[in-house]
Amino acid sequence: MSNIASAFDHGKAFVAFITCGDPDLETTAASVRAAVENGADLIELGIPFSDPTAEGPVIQEASLRALQGGVTTDKIFRFVEDLRKDVSVPMVFMTYANVIFSYGAERFIPTCARIGIDGLILPDLPFEEKEEFLPLCRKYGVDLVSLIAPTSENRVAMIAREAEGFIYLVSSLGVTGTRSEITTDLKPIIRTIRENTSVPVAVGFGISTPDQAAAMAALSDGAIVGSAIEKILARYGREAPAHIGEYVRSMKAALSF
């Protein structure tokens, strides 16, 4: 059974996204620990990329700060290895296919398995091209997490049937970022997903307030938050972890129903 599924075993899951190396890896480590201590059930670690096409300005800027600070994939691998000494919740990498290509999938994916990364989310990898990485992911027990968007339409059932770990349901069109309201009707999409798989589904893109998290989790199995956490990092820098802990506690409380 997928280790990621354990994040959804005790009620609605709160999934926190944090860019590695913004402003430095020590702050990332403290932020992850603060998030977990305050109720985060699953951590998405962003590996910075110079052209993060799915991201809005907040996460783009976080990636840029991290890259300017000298973060590399190898440094992130060592950082995760250290983090795994005391952080036991499921963790996944969110990055871009190019990062894996340039590193070498034959090295990247086994290393993920060795250091305790449970899955990969690759927003620029079309469903039809996932065979590029899937055999290696299966070989080493790393879930290749599927994304489903409002534009997936007649492909939803097909993607759901082959999903692993959890399904990342994109709440709205466009890039990541906080939104004042989420207007997409996700009910029919979630209904189709439920008809085709028992894999949990969590909603991301645009969630920033406890009310939004509660509304999305009422429809699904959990809520994913990234840009709102990155805004706290941008504002407070190395002082951010305590504020992130507070924020995660309020968001997790909203999901306890």
Image (cartoon, helix red, strand yellow):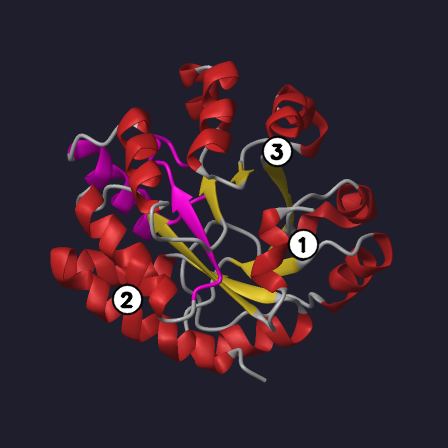
The mark nearer the N terminus, 2 or 3, is 3
User: Which residue type carries mark 3?
Assistant: Gly
Please tell me whether residue 21 belongs to the stretch shown in magenta. Answer: no
Label 2 and label 1: CA atoms lie apart by 29 Å
Label 2 and label 3: CA atoms lie apart by 31 Å
Label 3 SS: loop
The mark nearer the N terminus, 2 or 1, is 1
For image coordinates 63% across by 55% down, the residue present is 5
Local packing at callout 2 (Cα closer than 10 Å; few below 14, some 14-19, many 20+) is many
Please tell me whether residue 46 belongs to the stretch shown in magenta. Answer: yes
Disc on res. 150: 1
Label 1 and label 3: CA atoms lie apart by 29 Å
Q: Is residue 92 left or right of residue 226?
A: right
- Which residue bears the numbered disc 3? 141
* Cβ–Cβ under 8 Å for marks 1 and 3: no
User: Which residue type carries mark 2?
Assistant: Ile
Label 2 SS: helix
Between residues 170 and 256, which one lies in front from this camera angle? 256
Disc on res. 173: none
Disc on res. 244: 2
The mark nearer the N terminus, 1 or 3, is 3
Q: Is residue 153 above or below residue 49?
A: below
Provide the residue span drawn in magenta.
40-68
Of badges 1 and 3, the one in the foreground is 3
Q: Position of residue 251 (x, y in %)?
A: 42, 75
Q: Position of residue 118 (x, y in %)?
A: 53, 41
Q: Quadrant of the C terminus?
A: bottom right
* Cβ–Cβ under 8 Å for marks 2 and 1: no
Q: Position of residue 200 (x, y in %)?
A: 68, 58
